Amino acid sequence: MIKINRSSAPLGAEIVGVDLSRNIDDAVFREIVDLFHEHEVVFFRNQKLTPEQHVAFSRRFGELEIHVRQDCCRPGFPELFV
């Protein structure tokens, strides 16, 4: 069950109750997208993701960009800018 903690800032919310390392069904993902549209910034604390899981989750939002500074990307994962 998704829960949100609204930020005291003008935008943003923490999404709680979602383990991004697991498969997220379409209904839960739509809820995350709706919260993103509503709050403009969302974040998830204390997630333990492999690089593959991080990229897979991110790709659900659309095509990922590759940063020009490859020296700042995770080796083997040009989608992950560190």
Image (cartoon, rainbow, N blue to C red):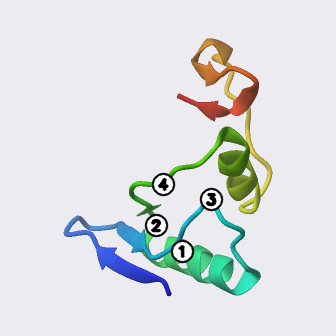
Residue bearing the label numbered 1: 37
Q: Check disc 4: other Cα within 10 Å, few if <14, some if 14-19, many if 20+.
A: few
Q: Amino acid at mark 3?
A: Ser
Residue bearing the label numbered 2: 40
Disc number lying in front (3 or 2)? 3
First in sequence, mark 4 or 1: give its number.
Answer: 1
Residue 65 x/y as whole percent = 73, 38
Q: Amino acid at mark 2?
A: Glu
Which residue sits furthest top? 71
Q: Which mark is residue 21?
A: 3
* Most foreground residue, 40 or 16: 16
Q: Amino acid at mark 4?
A: Gln
Residue bearing the label numbered 4: 47
Asked if the residue under mark 3 is in contact with the one under mark 4, i.e. CB atoms within 8 Å, the reply is: yes
Asked if the residue under mark 1 is in contact with the one under mark 2, i.e. CB atoms within 8 Å, the reply is: yes
Task: Kindly identify the residue that appears in the image at 59 percent across and 48 percent down.
Answer: 49
